[in-house]
């Protein structure tokens, strides 16, 4: 793989070191549109065929305040509470779309280092770690969740680093009305997608309860509609 989203100066969760993580594992202010409006790239969400609720999630910022990536939610807001089989968490129907601009290797904003290029693997990593953030096996003690999450996110990193491997298949879905190839993977926790739009944005997506096969993506024309 060329490069991934584990850029210099970031924690394994994808945010600047020392930043306080949000439930998704990236820094940002939840439920405020301000960060989204600062992005120099377009945001993507599910297209107009999806008629359910839409909601803001998080925007990840670099040390110099540059927007690096962010997520938009669709459907039920997922819970991270441990549930018995058949509980509320298993009945949730949601899809999250991650947008990350395609960038070459570049200097960091403060000029002290080099940031790795972003790629489809970057989107796959963010989607995989995002899905894990809303997963908590019911039989697991709260104290053990941190260790479990560390192990699972490392596995998600390794999978994102091998999109041509046997754990991934391909799926064609519309992006801005154009058929686009995505890498697709299912797990016991949900599904993950990763691909690229012609606008120069890499797309990741993850969800549960909603079938990935019927989804379409498009540029968000009015980000305020997600508030």
Image: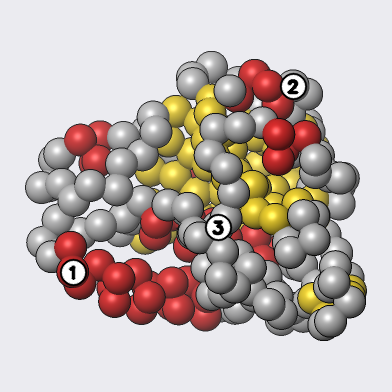
Residue depicted at 59% across the width and 49% down the height:
28
Q: Is residue 163 visible?
A: no
Rounded to the nearest angstrom, the CA distance separating label 2 from label 3 is: 23 Å
Rounded to the nearest angstrom, the CA distance separating label 1 from label 2 is: 41 Å
Q: Using residue 111 as the reference point, say whether residue 86 is left or right of it.
A: left
Q: Using residue 179 as the reference point, say whether residue 90 is left or right of it.
A: left
Q: The C terminus appears in which quarter of the rendering?
A: top right
How many numbered circles does the render carry?
A: 3
- Residue to which mark 3 is pinned: 26
Do labels 2 and 3 touch, CB within 8 Å? Answer: no
Q: The N terminus appears in which quarter of the rendering?
A: bottom right
Expressed as whole percent of the image width and height from the top left, the position of residue 224 reads 68, 21
Q: Residues within 10 Å of mark 3 (few under 14, many from 20)?
A: many
Expressed as whole percent of the image width and height from the top left, the position of residue 163 reads 61, 72
Q: Is residue 134 visible?
A: yes
Describe the element under mark 3 as helix, strand or loop.
loop
Q: Using residue 12 as the reference point, say whether residue 7 is left or right of it.
A: right
Expressed as whole percent of the image width and height from the top left, the position of residue 38 reads 80, 40
Q: Residues within 10 Å of mark 2 (few under 14, many from 20)?
A: few
- Mark 1 or 2: in front is 1
Dot 3 or dot 1, earlier in sequence: 3
Residue depicted at 38% across the width and 75% down the height:
150
Pick the front one: 76 or 162: 76
Q: Which mark is residue 222?
A: 2
Rounded to the nearest angstrom, the CA distance separating label 3 from label 1 is: 21 Å
- Residue to which mark 1 is pinned: 143
Image height of 194 relative to 13, above or below: above
Pick the front one: 55 or 158: 55
Expressed as whole percent of the image width and height from the top left, the position of residue 91 reads 25, 34
């Amino acid at each position: 793989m060329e490069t991934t989203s584990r850029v210099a100066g970031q924690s394994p969760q994808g945010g600047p070191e020392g930043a306080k993580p949000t439930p998704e594992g990236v820094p940002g202010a939840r439920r405020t549109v301000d960060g989204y409006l600062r992005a120099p790239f377009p945001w993507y969400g599910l297209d107009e065929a999806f008629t359910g609720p839409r909601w803001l999630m998080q925007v990840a910022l670099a040390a110099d305040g540059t927007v690096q990536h962010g997520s938009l939610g669709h459907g039920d807001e997922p819970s991270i509470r441990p549930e018995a089989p058949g509980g509320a968490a298993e009945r949730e129907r949601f899809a999250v779309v991650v947008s990350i601009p395609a960038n070459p290797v570049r200097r960091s904003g403060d000029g002290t280092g080099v940031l790795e290029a972003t790629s489809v693997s970057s989107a796959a990593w963010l989607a995989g770690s995002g899905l894990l953030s809303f997963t908590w096996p019911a039989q697991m003690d709260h104290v053990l969740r941190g260790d479990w999450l560390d192990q699972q996110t490392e596995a998600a990193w390794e999978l994102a680093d091998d999109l041509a491997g046997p754990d991934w298949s391909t799926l064609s879905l519309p992006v801005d009305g154009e058929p686009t190839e995505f890498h697709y993977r299912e797990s016991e926790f949900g599904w993950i997608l990763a691909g690229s739009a012609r606008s120069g944005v890499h797309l990741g997506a993850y969800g549960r309860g909603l079938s990935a096969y019927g989804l379409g993506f498009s540029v968000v024309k009015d980000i305020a509609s997600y508030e």
